[in-house]
Amino acid sequence: MKVTDHLRNANGKTLFTIEILPPLKGENIKTLFDNIDPLMEFKPPFIDVTYHREEYVYKKKEGGLLEKRTTRKRPGTVGICAAIQNKYKIDTVPHIICGGFDKEETENALIDLHFLGINNVLVLQGDAIKTESRFVPEPGGHHFASDLLQQVVCMNKGIYMDDDLQNVTPTDFCIGVAGYPEKHYFAPNLKTDLKYLKLKVDLGAEYIVTQMFFENKRYFEFVEKCREAGINVPIIPGIKPITSKAQSSILAKTFHIDMPEDLADEVEKCKDNASAKEVGIEWCIQQSKELVKFGVPTLHYYSMGKSDPIYRIAKALF
Ligand SMILES: Cc1cc2nc3c(=O)[nH]c(=O)nc-3n(C[C@H](O)[C@H](O)[C@H](O)COP(=O)(O)OP(=O)(O)OC[C@H]3O[C@@H](n4cnc5c(N)ncnc54)[C@H](O)[C@@H]3O)c2cc1C
């Protein structure tokens, strides 16, 4: 089923959904299932699975010279989506990205997803390679999420890259995109960022998932500004509990977001990671309760590979 159908069928009730990361290369999928299993109690109608592009690593060769290699540390997004659908009989939303793919590779990946019965995709530009300061598109690939989105929309209309193809089967993907309550780091201002967000919706995006935020006011204002700009699709809030002392700064830096003073102060006062985690979970519970009151379509938790804090938060809410 499509994400939008799940949201519609909920009839205004807030759902529980999560985003997970594929395990690191070489790890067992059982660890992932062990993390997901307890969360099934809260009946997530769909699970998002992130996509991780290649990275450059430097290996020391004999004689001390460094060799640059390309490696993908978290492969397996498509396989995990299929495995989850198979094991739990719930829908998955693979993230698809511009970075590292040319258009033909994207088309082939979408065909794989279609054959696997996956009906949803979250369409993204994708993170820049860790050692590069800004996003660089693949030769023959897409630059912006809106470009990639247009390829998915074309395939949904039965338009593939090779226009000589006969009797083409259209795909049927429900398309989600990312939105940034505190602005995407590369946008000069929120107004410009919203202009491009509206472009994605006008081109066919059916819902938006937000970057994490720790102050609900940011989300409420963002929704208001989106509506004023004529963006009328569901806006799913993505949230995450802080689980260690260092995260207060790391998350702010990595995701270009603000950490509320009260939360940052509380975390700073903590003697160790265990107490910082308690502060983070309690904050996230209060955040979630207020978002439910606001009437959000789903509380979408970034699990980042650890389900126990999410379990405790969901237990307090659902
Ligand atoms: C919910 C969520 C899930 C994510 N999952 C992943 C994941 O699985 N894998 C991963 O690698 N990354 C992921 N990311 C990170 C994301 O890829 C980065 O934040 C990336 O830098 C931007 O992606 P986007 O799709 O929002 O880009 P875009 O919508 O392409 O926007 C990128 C920037 O370009 C600007 N812009 C957009 N269109 C145009 C245009 N036509 N002309 C000029 N400027 C334009 C925008 O204002 C913005 O500043 C996720 C982010 C979110 C919020």
Image (cartoon, helix red, strand yellow):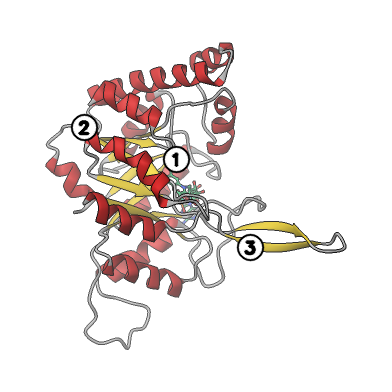
Compare residues 251 and 208 and report the one nearer the observer.
251
Q: CA distance from mark 2 to mark 3?
A: 42 Å
Mark 2 vs ligand 1: CB below 8 Å:
no
Q: What residue type is disc 3 on?
A: Thr
Of the two numbered discs 1 and 3 on the same chain, state the one appearing first in sequence: 3
Label 3, on which residue? 70
N-term mark: 1 or 2: 2
Vertical comparison of 307 with 175: above or below:
above
Of the 4 image quadrants, the one containing the C terminus is top left
Q: Residue 44 bears which disc, if any?
A: none
- Residue in front for this viewpoint, 243 or 102: 243
- Which quarter of the figure has residue 43? top left
Q: Quadrant of residue 286?
A: top left
| Residue 269 screen position, x and y as percent | 57, 11
Q: Is residue 226 visible to us here?
A: yes
User: Quadrant of the image for the N terminus?
Assistant: bottom left
Residue type, label 2:
Thr
**Residue behind mark 1:** 305
> Is 127 on the left or on the right of 88, as rendered?
right
Dot 1 amino acid type = Gly
On the image, numbered disc 2 is attached to which residue?
14
* x and y, in percent, of residue 42 in the image: 23, 34
How many numbered dots are placed on residues in this image?
Answer: 3
Instruction: Between label 2 and label 3, give the one nearer the viewer.
Output: 3
